[in-house]
Image (cartoon, rainbow, N blue to C red):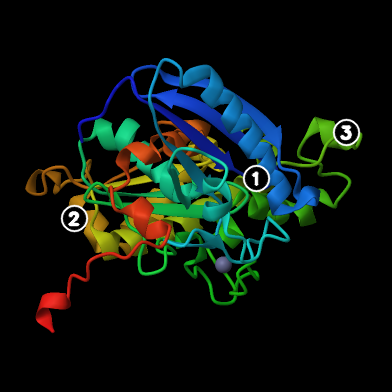
Amino acid sequence: MDLDHDALTIGIDLGATSVRVAAYSPAAGLLETSIFPTRIAAGPVGVVDDIGDNVLRLLKVYSRSRPCVGIGVGSPGPLELPAGRLHAPPNLPGWDKFPLLHELQDRFPHSVFLDGDAKVAALAEYVLGSGKEFSVDSLCMLTLGTGVGSGIILKGRIWHGASGMAAEAGHLTIDPAGPICGCGNAGCLEAYASGTAIVKAAAHFAADDTHCFSPGRADGTHALTAGDLAIAARAGDPEARSIYDGAGRALGIALADLINLLNFPLYVIGGGVAQSWDLLSSSIFEELHRRSYVYRLTASDGPASQAFPGGTRVISSRLGPEAGLLGACILPLHAPPHEHEEALGDSQPDPHATLR
Ligand SMILES: [Zn+2]
Protein backbone atom coordinates (compact mmCIF):
# COMPACT_ATOMS: atom_id res chain seq x y z
CA MET A 1 0.00 0.00 0.00
CA ASP A 2 1.25 3.48 -0.86
CA LEU A 3 1.08 5.44 2.36
CA ASP A 4 1.17 9.16 2.78
CA HIS A 5 4.12 9.48 5.12
CA ASP A 6 3.03 12.89 6.33
CA ALA A 7 -0.49 11.70 7.18
CA LEU A 8 -1.71 11.82 10.76
CA THR A 9 -3.62 9.09 12.55
CA ILE A 10 -4.87 8.84 16.13
CA GLY A 11 -4.59 5.47 17.90
CA ILE A 12 -6.62 4.42 20.95
CA ASP A 13 -5.60 1.39 23.03
CA LEU A 14 -8.58 0.73 25.31
CA GLY A 15 -7.69 -1.39 28.33
CA ALA A 16 -9.57 -2.40 31.46
CA THR A 17 -7.26 -0.42 33.76
CA SER A 18 -5.92 2.33 31.50
CA VAL A 19 -6.41 3.91 28.10
CA ARG A 20 -3.58 5.08 25.83
CA VAL A 21 -4.28 7.63 23.11
CA ALA A 22 -1.55 8.62 20.65
CA ALA A 23 -0.93 10.84 17.64
CA TYR A 24 1.06 9.02 14.94
CA SER A 25 2.50 9.57 11.50
CA PRO A 26 4.25 6.96 9.33
CA ALA A 27 7.22 9.32 8.88
CA ALA A 28 7.69 10.30 12.53
CA GLY A 29 6.17 7.35 14.44
CA LEU A 30 4.50 8.13 17.77
CA LEU A 31 4.27 11.94 18.12
CA GLU A 32 2.64 12.07 21.55
CA THR A 33 0.97 9.55 23.85
CA SER A 34 -1.40 10.27 26.71
CA ILE A 35 -2.31 7.64 29.30
CA PHE A 36 -5.22 7.90 31.71
CA PRO A 37 -7.11 5.46 33.96
CA THR A 38 -10.21 3.69 32.60
CA ARG A 39 -12.98 5.10 34.82
CA ILE A 40 -14.99 1.87 35.00
CA ALA A 41 -17.32 3.45 37.61
CA ALA A 42 -18.24 6.22 35.12
CA GLY A 43 -19.68 3.61 32.72
CA PRO A 44 -18.89 3.24 29.04
CA VAL A 45 -20.17 6.69 28.02
CA GLY A 46 -17.98 8.34 30.68
CA VAL A 47 -14.90 6.45 29.41
CA VAL A 48 -15.71 7.35 25.79
CA ASP A 49 -16.07 11.02 26.90
CA ASP A 50 -12.54 10.85 28.42
CA ILE A 51 -11.22 9.32 25.18
CA GLY A 52 -13.01 12.05 23.18
CA ASP A 53 -11.38 14.88 25.19
CA ASN A 54 -7.90 13.40 24.65
CA VAL A 55 -8.41 12.71 20.94
CA LEU A 56 -9.74 16.21 20.25
CA ARG A 57 -6.78 17.75 22.10
CA LEU A 58 -4.26 15.74 20.02
CA LEU A 59 -6.13 16.59 16.80
CA LYS A 60 -5.99 20.28 17.67
CA VAL A 61 -2.21 20.15 18.13
CA TYR A 62 -1.19 17.81 15.29
CA SER A 63 -3.79 18.07 12.52
CA ARG A 64 -2.75 21.63 11.62
CA SER A 65 0.34 20.42 9.79
CA ARG A 66 -0.77 16.90 8.77
CA PRO A 67 -4.04 15.66 7.23
CA CYS A 68 -5.78 13.21 9.60
CA VAL A 69 -6.76 10.04 7.73
CA GLY A 70 -8.57 8.29 10.57
CA ILE A 71 -8.79 7.17 14.16
CA GLY A 72 -7.90 3.54 15.01
CA VAL A 73 -9.08 1.70 18.12
CA GLY A 74 -7.99 -1.59 19.70
CA SER A 75 -10.62 -2.90 22.13
CA PRO A 76 -10.96 -5.86 24.47
CA GLY A 77 -13.51 -8.47 23.36
CA PRO A 78 -15.76 -10.20 22.73
CA LEU A 79 -16.22 -7.62 19.97
CA GLU A 80 -18.81 -8.09 17.21
CA LEU A 81 -17.69 -6.81 13.81
CA PRO A 82 -18.46 -5.06 11.59
CA ALA A 83 -21.12 -3.64 13.97
CA GLY A 84 -18.47 -2.62 16.52
CA ARG A 85 -20.50 -3.78 19.53
CA LEU A 86 -19.12 -5.37 22.71
CA HIS A 87 -20.64 -8.52 24.23
CA ALA A 88 -20.20 -8.81 28.03
CA PRO A 89 -16.44 -8.11 28.09
CA PRO A 90 -15.24 -9.82 31.31
CA ASN A 91 -12.96 -6.94 32.35
CA LEU A 92 -15.34 -4.10 31.46
CA PRO A 93 -18.44 -4.59 33.61
CA GLY A 94 -21.46 -2.63 32.37
CA TRP A 95 -20.29 -2.61 28.71
CA ASP A 96 -22.50 -5.47 27.46
CA LYS A 97 -24.07 -4.57 24.06
CA PHE A 98 -22.30 -1.17 24.13
CA PRO A 99 -22.10 0.20 20.55
CA LEU A 100 -18.49 1.36 20.89
CA LEU A 101 -17.91 2.15 17.22
CA HIS A 102 -21.02 4.34 16.87
CA GLU A 103 -20.38 6.13 20.19
CA LEU A 104 -16.84 6.99 19.10
CA GLN A 105 -17.77 7.91 15.54
CA ASP A 106 -20.41 10.38 16.79
CA ARG A 107 -17.69 12.37 18.54
CA PHE A 108 -15.15 12.85 15.73
CA PRO A 109 -15.00 14.46 12.29
CA HIS A 110 -12.74 11.62 10.98
CA SER A 111 -13.48 7.96 10.21
CA VAL A 112 -13.11 5.59 13.17
CA PHE A 113 -11.69 2.07 12.58
CA LEU A 114 -12.29 -0.42 15.39
CA ASP A 115 -10.80 -3.88 15.90
CA GLY A 116 -9.79 -6.32 18.65
CA ASP A 117 -6.75 -5.37 20.75
CA ALA A 118 -4.79 -8.54 19.92
CA LYS A 119 -5.72 -8.27 16.22
CA VAL A 120 -4.30 -4.74 15.96
CA ALA A 121 -1.18 -5.87 17.88
CA ALA A 122 -0.75 -8.60 15.23
CA LEU A 123 -1.16 -5.97 12.50
CA ALA A 124 1.59 -3.83 14.06
CA GLU A 125 3.89 -6.85 14.36
CA TYR A 126 3.18 -7.66 10.69
CA VAL A 127 3.71 -4.13 9.33
CA LEU A 128 6.41 -2.75 11.65
CA GLY A 129 7.97 -5.73 13.50
CA SER A 130 8.87 -9.32 12.72
CA GLY A 131 6.51 -9.54 9.71
CA LYS A 132 8.63 -6.87 8.04
CA GLU A 133 11.91 -8.40 9.26
CA PHE A 134 11.13 -11.82 7.71
CA SER A 135 9.08 -10.52 4.72
CA VAL A 136 6.13 -12.85 5.40
CA ASP A 137 2.58 -12.38 4.09
CA SER A 138 0.84 -14.17 7.00
CA LEU A 139 1.43 -14.57 10.72
CA CYS A 140 -0.29 -15.57 13.96
CA MET A 141 0.36 -13.65 17.19
CA LEU A 142 -0.49 -14.57 20.77
CA THR A 143 -0.51 -11.76 23.37
CA LEU A 144 0.04 -12.87 26.97
CA GLY A 145 -1.35 -10.29 29.38
CA THR A 146 -4.26 -10.26 31.82
CA GLY A 147 -5.76 -12.80 29.39
CA VAL A 148 -4.39 -14.46 26.26
CA GLY A 149 -5.41 -12.70 23.05
CA SER A 150 -4.52 -13.57 19.50
CA GLY A 151 -4.61 -12.22 16.00
CA ILE A 152 -4.18 -13.77 12.56
CA ILE A 153 -2.83 -11.84 9.58
CA LEU A 154 -3.73 -13.73 6.41
CA LYS A 155 -2.11 -12.46 3.20
CA GLY A 156 -1.65 -9.00 4.65
CA ARG A 157 -5.13 -8.58 6.17
CA ILE A 158 -6.55 -9.15 9.65
CA TRP A 159 -8.62 -12.36 9.56
CA HIS A 160 -11.99 -11.65 11.23
CA GLY A 161 -14.14 -14.71 10.53
CA ALA A 162 -17.90 -14.30 10.12
CA SER A 163 -18.58 -12.17 13.22
CA GLY A 164 -15.21 -10.60 14.02
CA MET A 165 -14.46 -13.25 16.62
CA ALA A 166 -11.87 -15.34 14.76
CA ALA A 167 -8.52 -16.19 16.34
CA GLU A 168 -9.63 -16.72 19.94
CA ALA A 169 -6.59 -18.93 20.50
CA GLY A 170 -6.57 -18.05 24.22
CA HIS A 171 -9.60 -20.33 24.52
CA LEU A 172 -8.16 -23.40 22.80
CA THR A 173 -8.57 -26.32 25.22
CA ILE A 174 -5.23 -27.52 26.59
CA ASP A 175 -6.63 -29.93 29.23
CA PRO A 176 -10.36 -30.74 29.49
CA ALA A 177 -9.83 -31.41 33.22
CA GLY A 178 -7.98 -28.13 33.76
CA PRO A 179 -8.92 -25.00 35.71
CA ILE A 180 -12.15 -23.16 34.82
CA CYS A 181 -11.59 -20.22 32.46
CA GLY A 182 -13.50 -16.90 32.41
CA CYS A 183 -15.17 -18.01 29.13
CA GLY A 184 -16.94 -20.94 30.87
CA ASN A 185 -14.73 -23.69 29.42
CA ALA A 186 -12.21 -25.71 31.45
CA GLY A 187 -8.48 -25.86 30.74
CA CYS A 188 -8.16 -23.04 28.17
CA LEU A 189 -4.69 -21.77 27.18
CA GLU A 190 -5.59 -18.53 29.02
CA ALA A 191 -5.98 -20.51 32.26
CA TYR A 192 -2.25 -21.47 32.04
CA ALA A 193 -0.34 -18.80 30.13
CA SER A 194 -1.89 -15.42 31.07
CA GLY A 195 -0.30 -13.22 33.72
CA THR A 196 -3.40 -13.81 35.85
CA ALA A 197 -3.03 -17.60 35.57
CA ILE A 198 0.69 -17.47 36.45
CA VAL A 199 -0.04 -15.48 39.62
CA LYS A 200 -2.92 -17.82 40.48
CA ALA A 201 -0.69 -20.88 40.07
CA ALA A 202 1.69 -19.34 42.61
CA ALA A 203 -1.06 -18.75 45.15
CA HIS A 204 -0.80 -22.10 46.87
CA PHE A 205 2.97 -21.77 47.22
CA ALA A 206 2.75 -18.10 48.24
CA ALA A 207 0.11 -18.85 50.88
CA ASP A 208 2.90 -20.64 52.73
CA ASP A 209 4.62 -17.94 54.84
CA THR A 210 8.02 -19.42 54.11
CA HIS A 211 7.51 -18.89 50.39
CA CYS A 212 6.77 -15.33 49.37
CA PHE A 213 8.61 -15.23 45.95
CA SER A 214 9.28 -11.49 46.24
CA PRO A 215 11.02 -9.40 48.95
CA GLY A 216 8.36 -6.66 48.65
CA ARG A 217 5.60 -9.13 49.47
CA ALA A 218 7.19 -10.22 52.75
CA ASP A 219 6.07 -6.96 54.36
CA GLY A 220 2.82 -6.86 52.40
CA THR A 221 3.81 -3.80 50.33
CA HIS A 222 2.63 -5.12 46.97
CA ALA A 223 0.61 -7.87 45.36
CA LEU A 224 2.53 -10.67 43.65
CA THR A 225 2.96 -10.24 39.88
CA ALA A 226 4.04 -12.53 37.04
CA GLY A 227 7.18 -10.34 36.86
CA ASP A 228 8.07 -11.15 40.52
CA LEU A 229 7.72 -14.84 39.73
CA ALA A 230 9.99 -14.47 36.70
CA ILE A 231 12.67 -12.88 38.89
CA ALA A 232 12.29 -15.73 41.42
CA ALA A 233 12.49 -18.31 38.61
CA ARG A 234 15.68 -16.77 37.22
CA ALA A 235 17.16 -16.83 40.73
CA GLY A 236 16.55 -20.59 40.75
CA ASP A 237 13.29 -20.92 42.74
CA PRO A 238 12.01 -24.39 41.73
CA GLU A 239 8.28 -23.59 42.19
CA ALA A 240 8.50 -20.39 40.15
CA ARG A 241 10.41 -22.26 37.43
CA SER A 242 7.79 -25.01 37.33
CA ILE A 243 4.98 -22.44 36.95
CA TYR A 244 6.71 -20.87 33.89
CA ASP A 245 7.50 -24.33 32.59
CA GLY A 246 3.76 -25.19 32.78
CA ALA A 247 2.82 -21.95 30.98
CA GLY A 248 5.39 -22.75 28.26
CA ARG A 249 4.04 -26.28 27.86
CA ALA A 250 0.48 -24.98 27.42
CA LEU A 251 1.76 -22.48 24.83
CA GLY A 252 3.66 -25.25 23.02
CA ILE A 253 0.53 -27.46 22.88
CA ALA A 254 -1.59 -24.59 21.51
CA LEU A 255 1.10 -23.54 19.01
CA ALA A 256 1.46 -27.13 17.77
CA ASP A 257 -2.28 -27.10 16.95
CA LEU A 258 -2.03 -23.69 15.28
CA ILE A 259 1.02 -24.72 13.22
CA ASN A 260 -0.65 -27.98 12.12
CA LEU A 261 -3.78 -26.02 11.20
CA LEU A 262 -2.32 -22.92 9.52
CA ASN A 263 1.19 -23.79 8.25
CA PHE A 264 2.11 -20.08 8.48
CA PRO A 265 5.76 -19.00 8.27
CA LEU A 266 5.66 -16.96 11.52
CA TYR A 267 4.16 -17.21 15.05
CA VAL A 268 4.85 -14.34 17.45
CA ILE A 269 4.44 -14.32 21.24
CA GLY A 270 3.86 -10.84 22.69
CA GLY A 271 2.32 -9.10 25.71
CA GLY A 272 3.88 -8.54 29.15
CA VAL A 273 4.43 -12.23 29.97
CA ALA A 274 6.43 -12.69 26.73
CA GLN A 275 9.18 -10.64 28.38
CA SER A 276 9.91 -13.95 30.16
CA TRP A 277 10.61 -15.70 26.83
CA ASP A 278 13.84 -17.05 28.40
CA LEU A 279 11.72 -18.99 30.93
CA LEU A 280 9.06 -20.15 28.46
CA SER A 281 10.89 -21.04 25.27
CA SER A 282 12.52 -24.39 26.12
CA SER A 283 9.20 -26.03 27.11
CA ILE A 284 7.45 -24.39 24.11
CA PHE A 285 9.94 -25.92 21.66
CA GLU A 286 9.92 -29.29 23.44
CA GLU A 287 6.13 -29.52 22.99
CA LEU A 288 6.33 -28.29 19.39
CA HIS A 289 8.81 -31.03 18.48
CA ARG A 290 6.68 -33.62 20.27
CA ARG A 291 3.28 -32.61 18.89
CA SER A 292 3.59 -30.98 15.46
CA TYR A 293 5.02 -32.90 12.51
CA VAL A 294 4.54 -29.77 10.42
CA TYR A 295 6.89 -27.96 12.81
CA ARG A 296 9.43 -30.83 12.85
CA LEU A 297 9.52 -30.83 9.06
CA THR A 298 9.59 -27.08 8.50
CA ALA A 299 11.29 -25.43 11.53
CA SER A 300 13.48 -22.63 10.14
CA ASP A 301 16.51 -23.95 12.07
CA GLY A 302 15.63 -27.64 11.67
CA PRO A 303 17.50 -30.33 9.71
CA ALA A 304 14.98 -30.31 6.83
CA SER A 305 14.78 -26.51 6.53
CA GLN A 306 16.59 -26.53 3.16
CA ALA A 307 13.62 -28.35 1.65
CA PHE A 308 11.18 -25.70 2.92
CA PRO A 309 12.57 -22.24 2.13
CA GLY A 310 11.50 -19.74 4.74
CA GLY A 311 10.44 -22.46 7.14
CA THR A 312 8.43 -21.98 10.34
CA ARG A 313 9.54 -19.48 12.97
CA VAL A 314 8.24 -19.13 16.54
CA ILE A 315 9.66 -15.99 18.18
CA SER A 316 8.97 -13.32 20.81
CA SER A 317 7.50 -9.97 19.71
CA ARG A 318 9.84 -7.38 18.23
CA LEU A 319 7.62 -4.46 19.31
CA GLY A 320 7.10 -5.40 22.98
CA PRO A 321 4.37 -3.60 24.97
CA GLU A 322 3.92 -0.92 22.25
CA ALA A 323 2.42 -3.37 19.73
CA GLY A 324 -1.23 -2.75 20.72
CA LEU A 325 -0.99 1.04 20.61
CA LEU A 326 1.02 1.06 17.35
CA GLY A 327 -1.53 -1.32 15.82
CA ALA A 328 -4.39 1.06 16.69
CA CYS A 329 -2.39 3.93 15.15
CA ILE A 330 -1.77 2.15 11.83
CA LEU A 331 -5.22 0.52 11.55
CA PRO A 332 -6.71 3.43 9.49
CA LEU A 333 -3.77 3.10 7.05
CA HIS A 334 -4.26 -0.64 6.47
CA ALA A 335 -8.01 -1.30 6.73
CA PRO A 336 -9.58 -2.17 3.36
CA PRO A 337 -11.44 0.94 2.08
CA HIS A 338 -14.91 -0.66 2.28
CA GLU A 339 -14.58 -1.75 5.91
CA HIS A 340 -15.52 1.58 7.45
CA GLU A 341 -18.75 1.90 5.45
CA GLU A 342 -19.64 -1.73 6.16
CA ALA A 343 -19.10 -1.18 9.88
CA LEU A 344 -21.49 1.77 9.93
CA GLY A 345 -24.22 -0.16 8.10
CA ASP A 346 -23.91 0.85 4.43
CA SER A 347 -24.88 -2.00 2.10
CA GLN A 348 -22.17 -3.86 0.23
CA PRO A 349 -22.43 -5.55 -3.17
CA ASP A 350 -23.37 -9.24 -2.84
CA PRO A 351 -20.54 -11.31 -4.40
CA HIS A 352 -22.97 -14.24 -4.98
CA ALA A 353 -25.55 -12.10 -6.79
CA THR A 354 -24.51 -13.25 -10.28
CA LEU A 355 -24.80 -16.91 -9.25
CA ARG A 356 -28.50 -16.70 -8.48
ZN1 LIG B 1 -11.53 -19.85 27.94
Percent x, y of residue 64 = 45, 17
Q: Quadrant of residue 21?
A: top right
Residue under pointer 1? 48
- Secondary structure of residue under mark 2: helix
Q: Quadrant of residue 167?
A: bottom left
| Quadrant showing the N terminus | top left
What separation in Å lies between label 3 and label 1 (alpha carbons)?
Answer: 33 Å
Q: Is residue 206 left or right of residue 300?
A: right
- Secondary structure of residue under mark 1: helix
Q: Is residue 108 left or right of residue 232?
A: left
Q: Are marks 3 and 2 in contact (CB under 8 Å)?
A: no
Q: Residue furthest right?
A: 219
Percent x, y of residue 204 = 78, 57
Which callout, 2 or 1, points at the residue further toward the start of the chain? 1
| Disc 2 crowd, CA 10 A, few/some/many (<14, 14-19, 20+) | some
Question: What residue type is disc 2 on?
Answer: Leu
Tell me if residue 290 can be seen.
Answer: no
Percent x, y of residue 4 = 27, 25
Percent x, y of residue 203 = 77, 54
Residue under pointer 3? 221
- Ligand 1 is within 8 Å of the C-beta of the residue at disc 2: no
| Disc 3 crowd, CA 10 A, few/some/many (<14, 14-19, 20+) | few
- Secondary structure of residue under mark 3: loop
Q: Nearer the viewer, residue 212 or 95?
A: 95
Tell me if residue 46 can be seen.
Answer: yes
Question: What residue type is disc 3 on?
Answer: Thr
Which quadrant of the frame does ligand 1 lie within? bottom right
Q: In the rendered image of this protein, does residue 169 appear above or below residue 8?
A: below
- Ligand 1 is within 8 Å of the C-beta of the residue at disc 1: no
Residue under pointer 2? 297
